[in-house]
Image (cartoon, grey):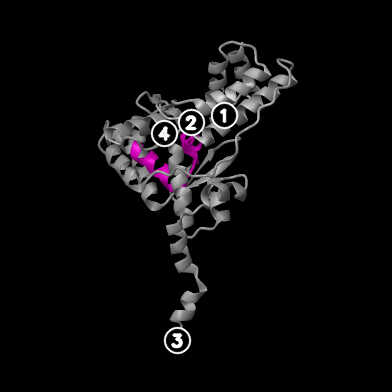
Amino acid sequence: MLTDLVERFIREVCAGRHNETAGAYRTKLKYLITYAKGERLNQDLVDKFKIYLLELTEKRRGGRVIHEPLSPWSIRSILQTTAHFLRWGAERNFWPELRLENIREPAAQPKAIDQFIFLRLMKAAACVGAEWERVRNTAILCVLRDSGARVGAVASIDMSDVDLVHGVMSSITKGGKRIWIYMSEPTVQAVSAWLEIRQAMDPWDYRLWTGQKHRGISRHGIYQMIRRLAVAAGIKGARINPHSFRHAFARDALRAGADLSQVSMLLHHVSIVVTAKYYARWDDKELRDIHRRVSPMREIVTAKP
């Protein structure tokens, strides 16, 4: 019963779109389904559900069970989605109005992929699989690292939306919005190499990234590809997923001197506030380096009298 209501909730909220939001809602609400064990939702169960999340000692990551607690960000996100679901159900009289207070918002710590790990993934991509697979995977890694685009947008790029002359592609992203994905020259070359092989494969699918069965690969397929490359590269313990590429792009762009409004537009955030919240965060060493670069005393000391 609860599982059916979750699916109905997702269909209504996501308007039937099978996008990243639908998958994220389903993953988060599985915690409530698991905890409820078929019981009817009530205030006591909801109160204890929050404690259950706080006391969990294991979680799933990439199909594996990890023996560590949920992060504060994960708990907060699960509770936020659960509260949305509870409000939806109360409005339709499936249960009475139920209160669910969230936990305090933790400090944002973007989990960017390390450059050394990225290079190891690139090395593995150049060695693992058939030639078409090596070239395709290398191009996908380049696009993710170079553009900061969401994995759903990268997976849904159509052949007609690729412009190598101007180094740009377009795609549909979260919320059904069309966005531009920009590429530097190395990424253009990687995508161009893939297009040559793709043409010889002559797939029937119109999407840019296709597989051995001539069908376009999904965002989940890109997740799986990155996991396989991580295993082949002997990478253990590091958090590696497509979104970590997005984090790395944002941080690198800010370090290179791009301002928040520019990074916000490149990431296609709804507001510059989102960009500042997640990425305009600096440790002591970074702040010292920034201060040395921008301090007005630098010019005064070096100026000739």
Tell me the CA gap for discs 2 and 1: 10 Å
Tell me the CA gap for discs 3 and 4: 58 Å
What element does badge 4 sit on? Answer: loop
Residue 81 point in image, percent of width and height: 61, 28
- Disc 3 vs disc 2: which is toward the camera? 2
Marks 2 and 3: in contact by CB < 8 Å? no
Q: Which residue is mark 3?
A: 304
Which amino acid type corresponds to the residue marked 4 in the rendered image?
A: Trp
Tell me the CA gap for discs 1 and 3: 60 Å
What element does badge 1 sit on? Answer: helix
Q: Quadrant of the N terminus?
A: top right
Which of these two is toward me, 180 or 247? 247
User: Was residue 73 drawn as part of the magenta stretch in this picture?
Assistant: no
Magenta-tinted stretch = 137-161
| Labels 1 and 3: the sequence-earlier one | 1
| Labels 1 and 4: the sequence-earlier one | 1
| Labels 2 and 4: the sequence-earlier one | 2
Q: Which residue is mark 1?
A: 78
Q: Residues within 10 Å of mark 4 (few under 14, many from 20)?
A: many
Horizontal side of 275 relative to 122 (left or right) equals right
Q: Residues within 10 Å of mark 2 (few under 14, many from 20)?
A: some
Q: Which mark is residue 70?
A: 2
Which amino acid type corresponds to the residue marked 3 in the rendered image?
A: Lys
Q: Residue at x 62, y 26 (%)?
A: 82
Q: Which residue is mark 4?
A: 209
Residue 53 point in image, percent of width and height: 53, 26
Marks 1 and 2: in contact by CB < 8 Å? yes
User: Was residue 153 drawn as part of the magenta stretch in this picture?
Assistant: yes
